Amino acid sequence: MENTVQIQILPEKINDLQFILKLANQKNNTSLKEFPYGYIRKRSIDARKKPVKYNLQVVLSKTEIAPRVPVVNYSNVSDKPEVHIIGAGPAGLYAALEAIELGFKPILFERGKDVRERRRDLAKLNKEHIVDPESNYCFGEGGAGTYSDGKLYTRSKKRGNVLKVLELFVQFGAPYDILVDAHPHIGTNKLPKIITAMREQIIKSGGEVHFNSKLTDIQIQNNALKGITINGKDNYDVDHLILATGHSARDIFDLLHARNVKLEAKGFALGVRVEHSQEIIDLIQYHGKKNDEFLPPASYSLVEQVDGLGVYSFCMCPGGIIAPCATSPGEVVTNGWSPSKRNNPYSNSGIVVGVEPEKLPNFDPKNPFVCLELQAEVEKKCWEAAGKTQRVPAQRMIDFVEGRVSKDLPETSYQPGLTSVDLNNVLPSFITKRLRKAFKAFGKKMKGYYTNDAVLHAPESRTSSPISIPRDRETFEHVEVKGLYPCGEGAGYAGGIASAAVDGVNCMQAISRKVKDQSAFTMK
């Protein structure tokens, strides 16, 4: 017999299971003699007021019990029907694993390199400012998530089985804690081994994974996908193609547009990545208390409506690092990530303004690239402002709000370095005007946040895809091209690792339903 109980405890008691079980029994009007065993099912931090506490969901049991994590046993699919997948990010990898589970052979093409080889290119990007357009923080095995944090929190739980996504991460080597924490996080230092284990399972089960394999053309006849070309020379007949190329594959958008595949402009967000010392954020969020062995580095979530547009924090990284995430020479892009322990002395977060295509002065409903063009223009302008290197234009927060170039800049986690620039001159005025107002408002919500010790790095521009590839809600196929399944962040249907993985699963399940329906019709 099991009972589930909600309790609150002080942080210093978080590792005392006997205390937790005793308190849970008291809340349950039972005793340790009746329910001597149990474990923590869910855990979150309540820092709204002093003292900071943990909220726990505790499972009590009369018999010895341990958390149960389902394990998927994958069979061999080497002789099964094929499904082709473009992109080995979370959407593509989870689509491939789901394909095996459903009895299909996945053939996965990834333009970049495997996780081990990617490291060398990232080192060149950080130290030598050399951008490899096929291997960077966005392109390569595992996609953008592998080397940019591994946060797994998502609000899109109505779209699919998020729990299964997390359980598979655990099956392939992630810590069990991601099933417990309200805001699960793996860490960039641990993700490569997990991604490698997923790839090895795909191959072991008879699937195929091809690196350095870029989609360069598609063949469409009578509004149906017929084939693809890889690396400009290798042609494949394809019945079902999951297109999971991520939000930065601009050449794929160009290819689709050239082949008259319908695209639509999509809103995204644009702004800066703000870096504070982690100690400042801890003191603010924990009411003057530093994080210790019982509390993790503190995070924050901020939002403000300014002149009709939302300004909000994005991809907040406690104990994190700001990374150069350009995907082509001639541009600068920032993003943030954290190691599993989140023990870096800095905290960073995107602070961005929502951009709606209809409100842009050059909006044309016939031009699906209007937001992408703005994104690219800003990234190029920032690259030029910082000396045409991977250094970023930067400014202290109050200096930015008051319109003066910072005389000096503090240490930063951003390895390529900073160049002091007035960001009001490199970002669009409708962005900077709202950021200036928002930072003052955020300073009132979080006393100490508005400080000249905080540094703005520009730009934060790859928050999501600026283009959507429209698909049918029921079949998940493109609205005009049968057999083409736009998937994940790049198609506009996800916003992070977990939601992208869910979308990959959903697309593969849609293909399976279609094949079964066709088979049933043929048998009749």
Image: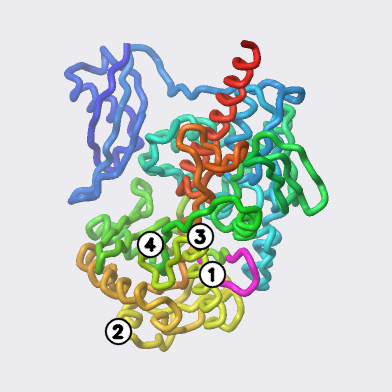
The reply to whether callout 3 and callout 2 are in contact (CB within 8 Å) is no
Q: Which percent across, then down, holds residue 12? A: 29, 42
Is the image coloured rainbow, by chain, by secondary structure, or in one colour? rainbow
From this view, report whether residue 116 is shown above or below residue 106: below
Give the main secondary structure, helix, strand or loop, of the magenta stretch: loop
Q: Earlier in the sequence, mark 3 or mark 2?
A: 3
The reply to whether callout 1 and callout 2 are in contact (CB within 8 Å) is no
Report the mark closest to the observer, 3 or 4: 3
Q: Which mark is residue 263?
A: none
Q: Which mark is residue 402?
A: 2
From this view, report whether residue 515 is shown above or below residue 347: above
Q: How many marks?
A: 4
Report the mark closest to the observer, 3 or 2: 3
Name the residue carrying label 3: 368
Q: Earlier in the sequence, mark 1 or mark 2?
A: 1
Q: Which mark is residue 356?
A: 4
In the rendered view, does 447 fall on the left or right side of 337? left
